[in-house]
């Protein structure tokens, strides 16, 4: 094998050209990773939202809470079912909830979006993974007070701690900020269920009921019981399944991101091929010498391929480094299934970064292949004669 | 002009390099063109709706709140209103499709007056008006699902707790591919009766009211009067132009424009580097030739221009392939992006084509600057002595 040192020195000796290729491929990788990171962030948010033992009860036929209604009477019957877990204080983990959407302006000049306002009772927080108030306090029942997440506070006009949020025909005083394990709950505003029902003129209505089962077998039993009772007319699914369904609506983002990455990679391949053809052309004599001193065709081929791959991987690493400052920055888009804004953070996890480096690897291998083949085809005698 | 043949020969001197540079620009600008077309199509269709002089009335608290069906007649009674219909998104599931297409409960008598850009055969429209369980479907919706007039279809409610059984009375078409041809209209009264039977509190909700004004002037005044009419009722409304209504959906999607601009910027800078690199490689090989040119009397300015024009030419040819390729591809095929809201038909507007070509020219110019400058600076003596 030709020592890699040879390739690196070669790249260094025409460093301006090498740098430009590295920067060029770096930018392409950057744009691709940006798209991957967006899709990954959206997916992650919905993925961590689900809890296997938690069950969402909705009207039969509804795929999202926002489309569902459950009557108060039925809600009480669900509460009476056995197999529902209790918390440390002995309260039953059965939470009737009412979801209302309102079109609220985003901060800055970012247009408006549908905000999900969830009417809850005090038990709701026990049904959310890692729920805790991080600033301020909990909202009191019976008054127009609300709590929300940090990312919502940043994203929406009037949603900051101590501010007044104008929504559903009035104002809600934001009294606290919560965290909920980075899940979909962090895209919601919570207020007292009766207050929300009254404000939206939906007294007594519930969108869904969330319950936690004691154990997996109780969960299955509860789901069957609720689903198959014709009197209820309800559907019950695990929270995990509910959010997996919603992650489907993020598919468009994923497909768009992948398509962009593939097209850009093809474009970059041509550029890499150009650089490598020039490298082979200007080093004909060196190649002749290598062959003359006994390196075989395959060895020369591998050497040039490696050089091309090193070049692109350097660009890949640069592109990945370039997106890291964006990691964790929150953004949002419409979740069309719930018809409301879903906030999430850019996420450049190991999978995304490895995908990016593979893309760079492919760029280098495919772009360098033909130039490398040309290098092997040079006749030793002619190549040595080149100046 | 007389140098053009010389420049063209230079472009094709290293064919492989020229083709690769061109292809790199073509492929990448294809992408940028498609991305920008997404923005421009929305602007253009929004602009186009102006001629229809339509107003959309929603509940004051937003789209998810009800608009009483009785409001429709009250709107019709206002002066300056030509027609008004309820248009309520049903969002039901058809077979095992995951993403619902546009199914709207409306008033068959006036729907084609309000949405006048759609063509329906008079006989089919009459059949639709007469059949309470009938529906009209858009040509694209019909094509995708192999529907024919006379077919029966079942839509399972997601937002509403009812199942619709509809008969297709006819198929509507339109000249413009961006119109909502992936939709279906059915009788509002049919849905409402089912809901009343179910004692659902969702009964009597018009969803939105689409209003056709008698003239495109004074839409603002009409909107004010609509708002005023319901101001002191239980269900106040917000009337906006159709353009503003569409804008609302675009806004919900988030900051797509910023994302597109960032990707495009990265691509353009990348292309400048890539094309500049290729140009520099070409010029390095031609140092001696440039010295000869200067020796026989070519001025620095001409040498500089020769190289710049060559760089721009390569970029423009590559750009033309990519940009026009995008234009052609979407003109030939009716490509529908399902699941990407705000898009019901897609094409590349001419404004995007011009933008794409301008980008190509800019890429060429910037990629040529450094190599051109260097060529202009070549000293005759050194250049002639240089063996490449």
Image: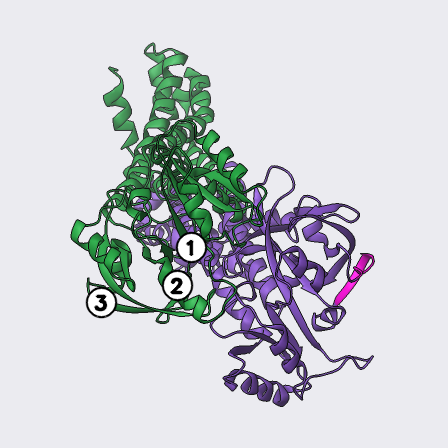
Report the side of A194 relative to B190 (left or right).
right
Q: Residues within 10 Å of mark 3 (few under 14, many from 20)?
A: few
Residue underneath mark 1: B88
Colour logic = by chain
- Supply the letter of whichever chain is purple: A
Q: Are marks 1 and 2 in contact (CB under 8 Å)?
A: yes
Give how far apart the Cα atoms at labels 3 and 1 are.
23 Å
Q: Residues within 10 Å of mark 2 (few under 14, many from 20)?
A: many
Task: Write the start and end of the magenta stretch as one range.
Answer: A131-140
Residue underneath mark 3: B151
- Main SS, magenta region, reads strand
Residue depth check, mark 3 versus mark 1: number of the one nearer the observer: 1
Relative depth, front residue between B185 and A282: B185
Image location of residue A313, percent across then percent down: 52, 53
Chain B pictured colour: green
Residue underneath mark 2: B191
Q: Is residue B90 above or below residue A125?
A: above
Give the total of numbered labels: 3
Q: Say if the magenta span includes residue A36.
A: no
């Amino acid at each position: 094998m030709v020592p890699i040192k040879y390739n690196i020195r070669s790249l260094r000796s025409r460093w301006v050209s090498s740098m430009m290729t590295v920067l060029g491929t770096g930018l392409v990788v950057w744009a691709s990773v940006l798209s991957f990171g967006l899709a990954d962030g959206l997916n992650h948010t919905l993925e961590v939202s689900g809890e296997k033992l938690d069950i969402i009860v909705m009207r039969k036929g509804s795929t999202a809470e926002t489309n569902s209604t459950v009557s108060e009477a039925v809600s009480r019957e669900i509460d009476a079912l056995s197999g529902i877990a209790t918390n440390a204080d002995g309260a039953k983990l059965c939470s009737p909830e009412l979801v209302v959407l309102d079109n609220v302006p985003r901060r800055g000049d970012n247009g408006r979006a549908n905000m999900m306002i969830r009417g809850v009772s005090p038990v709701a927080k026990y049904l959310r993974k890692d729920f805790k108030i991080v600033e301020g306090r909990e909202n009191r029942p019976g008054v127009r007070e609300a709590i929300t997440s940090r990312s919502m506070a940043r994203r929406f006009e009037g949603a900051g701690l101590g501010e007044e949020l104008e929504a559903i025909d009035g104002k809600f005083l934001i009294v606290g900020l919560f965290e909920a394990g980075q899940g979909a709950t962090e895209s919601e505003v919570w207020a007292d269920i009766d207050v929300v029902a009254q404000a939206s003129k939906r007294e007594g209505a519930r969108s869904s009921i969330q319950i936690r089962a004691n154990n997996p077998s109780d969960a299955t039993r509860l789901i069957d019981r609720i689903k198959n009772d014709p009197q209820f007319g309800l559907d019950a699914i695990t929270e995990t399944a509910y959010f997996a369904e919603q992650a489907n609506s993020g598919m468009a983002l994923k497909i768009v991101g992948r398509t962009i990455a593939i097209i850009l990679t093809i474009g970059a391949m041509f550029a890499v091929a150009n650089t490598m053809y020039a490298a082979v052309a200007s080093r004909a004599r060196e190649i002749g010498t290598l062959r003359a001193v006994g390196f075989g065709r395959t060895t020369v081929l591998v050497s040039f391929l490696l050089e091309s791959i090193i070049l692109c991987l350097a660009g890949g690493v640069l592109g990945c480094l370039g997106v890291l400052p964006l990691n964790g920055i929150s953004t949002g888009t419409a979740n069309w299934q719930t018809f409301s804004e879903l906030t999430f953070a850019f996420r450049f996890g190991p999978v995304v970064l490895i995908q990016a480096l593979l893309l760079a690897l492919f760029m280098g291998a495919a772009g360098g292949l033909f130039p490398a083949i040309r290098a092997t085809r040079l006749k030793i005698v002619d190549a040595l004669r080149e100046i | 002009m007389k140098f053009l043949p010389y420049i063209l020969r230079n472009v094709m001197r290293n064919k492989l390099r020229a083709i690769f540079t061109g292809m790199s620009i073509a492929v990448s600008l294809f992408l940028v063109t498609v991305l920008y077309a997404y923005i421009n199509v929305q602007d253009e269709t929004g602009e186009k709706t102006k001629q229809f002089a339509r107003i959309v009335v929603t509940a004051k608290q937003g789209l998810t709140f009800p608009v009483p069906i009785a409001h429709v007649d009250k709107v019709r009674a206002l002066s300056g209103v030509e027609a008004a219909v309820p248009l309520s998104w049903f969002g039901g599931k058809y077979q095992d499709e995951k993403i619902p297409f546009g199914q709207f409960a409306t008033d068959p008598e006036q729907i084609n007056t309000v949405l006048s850009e759609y063509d329906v055969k008079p006989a089919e429209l009459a059949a639709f008006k007469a059949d309470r369980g009938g529906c009209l479907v858009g040509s694209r919706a019909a094509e995708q699902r192999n529907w024919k007039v006379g077919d029966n279809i079942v839509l399972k409610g997601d937002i509403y707790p009812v199942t619709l059984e509809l008969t297709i009375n006819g198929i509507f078409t339109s000249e413009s591919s961006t119109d909502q041809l992936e939709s279906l209209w059915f009788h509002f009264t049919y849905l409402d009766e089912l809901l009343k039977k179910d004692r659902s509190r969702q009964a009597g909700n018009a969803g939105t009211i689409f209003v056709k004004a008698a003239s495109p002037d004074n839409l603002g005044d009409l909107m004010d009067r609509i708002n005023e009419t319901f101001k002191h009722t239980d269900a106040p409304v917000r009337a906006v132009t159709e353009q503003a209504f569409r804008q609302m959906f675009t806004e919900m999607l988030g900051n797509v424009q910023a994302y597109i601009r960032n990707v495009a910027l990265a691509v353009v800078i990348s292309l400048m580097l890539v094309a500049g690199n290729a140009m520099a490689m070409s010029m390095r090989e031609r140092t001696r030739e440039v010295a000869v040119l200067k020796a026989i009397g070519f001025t620095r300015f001409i040498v500089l221009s020769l190289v710049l024009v060559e760089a721009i030419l390569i970029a423009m040819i590559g750009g033309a392939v990519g940009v026009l390729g995008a234009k052609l591809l979407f003109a030939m095929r009716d490509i529908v992006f399902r699941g990407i809201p705000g898009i019901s038909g897609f094409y590349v507007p001419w404004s995007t084509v011009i933008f794409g070509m301008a980008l190509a020219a800019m890429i060429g110019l910037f990629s040529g600057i450094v190599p051109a400058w260097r060529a202009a600076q070549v000293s005759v003596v050194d250049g002639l002595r240089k063996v490449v």
